Image (cartoon, rainbow, N blue to C red):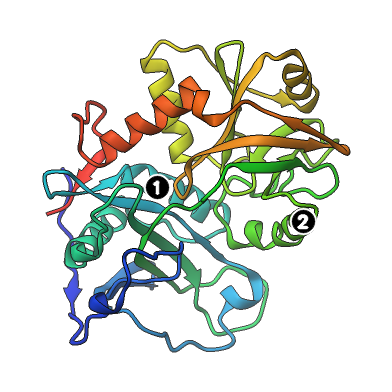
Amino acid sequence: MTATIDIQITKTTASRLSETDFNNLPFGKHFADHMFIADYEGGEWKNLRIVPYGNLSLSPAISALHYGQTFFEGLKAYKHVNGNVGIFRPYKNAERANHSAQRLSMPAIPEDIFVQSIAALVDLDRNWVPDKANHSLYIRPFMFATDAALGVQPSSTYKFMVLTGPVGAYFSKNLKVKIETNYSRSCEGGFGYAKAAGNYAGSLLPSAEAMKEGFDQLIWTDAKNHEYIEELGAANIMFIINGRLITPSTRDTILKGVTRDTVIALAKHWGIEVEERRVAVAEIIQAIKNGQLTEAFGVGTAATIAPITEIGHEGQLYQLSDPSTREFSNKTLKTLNDIRYGVIPDEFGWNYIVG
């Protein structure tokens, strides 16, 4: 049975809600009125509190700034057609957060604290959940090391925090992507499967170089020989080849995406054959040339379903089908939206209803 946790709440005296233009919500630029904070000291999480959103006072010596002990999660809350607010699959994010914590030698965050802190924060700021299609309240839980001491060792103190903010669509266009054959996002034995901040820092230069060439994102490949597809720049990646859903199998180099898991569950529910395995670059290029690859798309919390319409590889640019004609990804996006906005029954139990 889930235990109810005690969270101290201090409400803001000056809401910024009326100052926010809900018709113009660039991703990650607006934040709701409150944030959650918990402290890890003496081997336990304590001081669970919700306070007005604002700056932190921290020592410049905290180990997160010097040795990178920090990770984050991302999930969303949606306004349902009946007025309820639902958080989509928060326990899956709690599970993944603790995989990241374990790999980075950080303390686990109990699932009750993870989920209930988010639910309490969303409930308090429920007026910040947009009430329009393709909009949601983005939720950013994160943890970082706070020992004010220099030395390469795990911190003994940490903060776990949650921020929220209203967002519109992450991508405003179809994607032109490049298969990366020089840089690597992660390697076997590393921590590519963790949502560690360092993974994203390392992707910035390669992504910037690709954008200079006219691409929107990279398709990362394995670090050893660049022979196998791994991830899209900001999401997992999937293909429809000969009517089958094919996606790289997760391993220590690939993030276990919650949206990835959700799309696979829907495909299996519909009786579509799913293959989770190593996916060779050569196989994808050949399938494009043969007309067997009918859909390619990214899947992630921020983007949900992001259609890929052009793939660049070794100087060649391959055109893919018109996204409006894509049966699987369009059906998946509609079904996901219908579940997340409460339009159809949630037969999978994915929505966590707040309040």
Can you say which quadrant of the picture contains the N terminus? top left
User: Left or right: where does residue 44 sit relative to residue 314?
Assistant: left
Q: Nearer the viewer, residue 24 or 236?
A: 24
Disc 2 marks which residue? Answer: 206
Q: Is residue 353 left or right of residue 48?
A: left
Residue 208 image offset from top left, x and y in percent: 74, 60
Q: Few, some or many C-alpha atoms within 10 Å of disc 2 (few <14, some 14-19, many ≥20)? A: some
User: Is residue 352 left or right of 194 when viewed as pictured?
Assistant: left
Label 1 neighbourhood size at 10 Å, few (<14), some (14-19), many (20+)?
A: many
Dot placed on the residue nearer the N-terminal end, 2 or 1: 1
SS class of the residue under badge 1?
A: helix
Residue 85 appears at what percent x and percent y? Answer: 19, 51
Query: As rendered, which of 95 and 287 lies closer to the eye?
Result: 287
Residue receiving disc 1: 93
Taking depth in this image into account, of 170 and 201 the one nearest to the observer is 170
Residue at figure coordinates x 52%, y 52% from the top left = 100
Q: Is residue 253 visible?
A: no
Disc 1 marks which amino acid?
Answer: Asn
Q: Which residue is the extreme one toward the right?
A: 315
